[in-house]
Image (cartoon, rainbow, N blue to C red):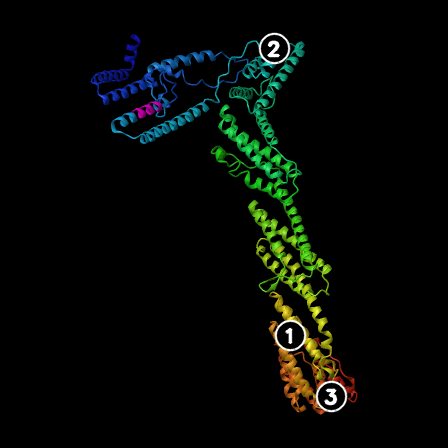
Amino acid sequence: MSQMMEKSTENPSEDRASFKSNGSIKSDEKLSTDGGTKLGRLRSFRKSIQHATQKSPLSSVKGSKVTSKSDTPTNESDSAASPPPPSPSLSTDSPATPLKNNQKKEDDEADASFRISKPLTRSKTDPGISKFSNSFMKRGASIRRSLKMVTKKDTDKISTKAISEASVEEDMEMEEEEEDLREEIEDCYVLPSIPLTPLSVMEINKLIETGELEEAHLNLLSLRQEFKQQSESCPDGSAMELATREKDLNLLYGMLRKKVSDIVCNPLSDKKLLLQMARVIQEEEKRLREPGGLKDSWMDAWRESVSAGVQVKVQSVHLDRIEQNSAWLAVHLGLLGEVIVKDLENVKQELQWSYPPSFTVFSTYVRGYNRVVAQHLKKLEQQVTELKDFYGLLDWIVNKYKSERIMGSLSLQPDIQDESTDLQLEENFLEQLREKYCRRMQEELRKIQDRVIELENEEVWKDGKAPEKEDNFPISSFPIDILTSVKSFILNSIKLDAQLEKKVVSSCLEELKQFPNGFEKAFSQHCTSHQPLWTEYRITYINSFTSLKKHMEEYKETCEDGVNGFQKAVDSLIDKLMRDLEDQFKEDVKPYLRRMMTRKWLTNDEDFDQLYSRTKLLSQHCSLMMPPHAKAFASKLHYHVVIEYIGQLMKSNYSCKNRKHEKAATKIRHQWNKLSDLFEDMKSNDEWLYHVGDDLSNIIGQKNTTDIKNHLQPVVQHYPDFSKKHLVAVLYFRGLMRGHEHQLILRRLTALKKEVDIASSDRNQVLFSNMQVTVNTNCLSNFPYSCVSFLMPDD
């Protein structure tokens, strides 16, 4: 009773609550004697409230320890509960004092005083309140169901909702409690008292082996103090004893350092052991310059141990042999990424809370992975031989390592945001890897080109298969194969690195420069001119390489020199293929052109018909050729036919007599028109050649020789290189070989050539100068030398 009175005096608000509660209970008992059913249920509800209240921590003075900042005591008695100041660096001049037990006693007294003098307060997420609310809601639902006939379905909904809300609140409270626990480790700490007399070396070593780091370290510090005192006060004769003591210290510290490394590398080390280790490191860092200890930094050694542990994890990732699994690298890198994320998640969520904040544990592990993984990748690169593996390695380094799959994982946020996730690769490693990737890509492209040639031989040349057509043009499928491969290489390079695109484009074009020449050699070897489809094949490959050249122009902005070099190689091949076609046509029509402007020609059309049929076949072939080569090809052969056909007049092989010149002129005009129509259909660019047949036919066909000089101006105007020797040859074919009228015609030509503006003529339009003129000496045998010399000059 006295205790209750004291309690009431100290907390009158609780007395009032108790009084009201008791009054309510008595009222319920009175109502229950009346036998009311509803009031009985209400009494049961109120009793449940009372029962829950009695069980609630609110009804007890003995509450949990308060961590709220608002409830922190500010009086003198409360100040004893505040954390102790950090331990100074201890030395023999300032020996440690046993503060641990005294401090604990003061904390207990302050805690007891705080609980008695301060009424207990709770946060909204207190588990007791959650349970009370849950019980209250369940009882309320029971009353409403009895009073208002609430259905069981509604009751289940209310109960489920209340339970879920209580569960969420409990989870939130657990998370808050975990965060409070995580914040308990501080950089500041109190070093326990150092024993005045250390244990033996064997005993200290045993403590280290069993993981009693705190006690082992305190005895080591005691041993160091003895060593320091002896070294300062001992005579010269005890140097051997000091050396032995120093050797023992070095041995023990070496064992302790090894134990620290083992603890760091062991993923199963508990929190208590890790904290002991951390305190040892902190204390040794303070005593780094004092005698008796290790000379190098313990923090640096700890970081090295972290890296060693990371290296063990990385090396433990499964790695298949190349001959066992073609996807060995992709599988290994995938597993490696999972290991990295899992380990860093453990560091973030658990491990870093076992250390003081000054250790920056998460940052140390991230840096360790950046360094160790980079070294691991260098070893992997030495085993890579396939293009897909070079690509996979580059992709993992450039993209995946920093992506959400690994270092950018959501589970590592937000801690990872402040960390550098750049792999600590050796200088030029990435550039060398890019170079190897490009070289391997060139080798792959070379294999594709060789395979294209093999397929062309197996599927086309070997069996004499007719070329396939696309948009009425014969074309091979190999440009699509080449373009698809190149485009794939370039698109993949863009995904890897924007800087790599230009290098890959340049490498592809450099390799493609060799393809036209290699293709032409294989084609010439497997397909001779005697093959029926020889012409069609050449036209097909002219079209195919034209298409390939056109598509490669899209990379001109990226690598202009490479595109120009490839186009030059393609143009060289196309020119050769076109020369082959030209030479073949010239060889075919040569015997028929040589028999033009002869006696047989005048009476027989057989040779011209052969010339015309071959020229018409040429026109059909030309229609299968893609622009712009079709016009260029037609123009070249158009010029050749004109040179050879008209050139027969210059050879003085035949002279028309007995007015046969009129028949010859008509025949020349007719044949010329037929040939001109063919070349016009072929869209020849040399339109200026169309006039020569009519101009010469007009000269040859004149009945009266006096009218010839009046028809010289068109030929002089159209062809400024038409000279006296050419006119003499035409007149010889016409049958006019000498006489006064002959002289007048030649003089008229001289006068016309002076009147014609030579400067305004196109110097590229040269026709007659390229014709060989043969002067018939029989017609000049009766002329004096001065006349002959007058006829010979060209201009």
Q: Position of residue 399 (x, y in %)?
A: 55, 41
Tell me the CA gap for discs 2 and 1. Answer: 114 Å
Residue 737: give its label. Answer: 3
Residue linked to disc 1:
765
Compared with residue 213, is residue 581 higher up or lower down, i.e. above or below? below
Residue linked to disc 2:
200
Compared with residue 701, is residue 413 higher up or lower down, i.e. above or below? above
Which of the two discs, 3 and 1, sits closer to the camera? 3
Q: What amino acid is at disc 2?
A: Ser
Closest to the observer: 139 or 3?
139
Quadrant of the image containing the N terminus:
top left
Magenta-tinted stretch: 130-139
**Residue 40 in view:** yes
Compared with residue 46, is residue 473 higher up or lower down, i.e. above or below? below
Residue 264: give its label. Answer: none
Place residue 153 in its image quadrant: top left
* Mark found first going from the N terminus, 2 or 1: 2
Q: Position of residue 88 (x, y in %)?
A: 50, 18
Q: Does the magenta-highlighted stretch encompass residue 132?
A: yes
* Label 1 neighbour load within 10 Å: few <14, some 14-19, many 20+: some
Q: How many marks?
A: 3
Q: Residue at x 61, y 38 (%)?
A: 329
* Mark found first going from the N terminus, 3 or 1: 3
Closest to the observer: 208 or 252?
208
Q: Residue at x 65, y 73 (%)?
A: 616
Q: What amino acid is at disc 1?
A: Gln
Q: Does the magenta-highlighted stretch encompass residue 281?
A: no
* Mark found first going from the N terminus, 3 or 2: 2
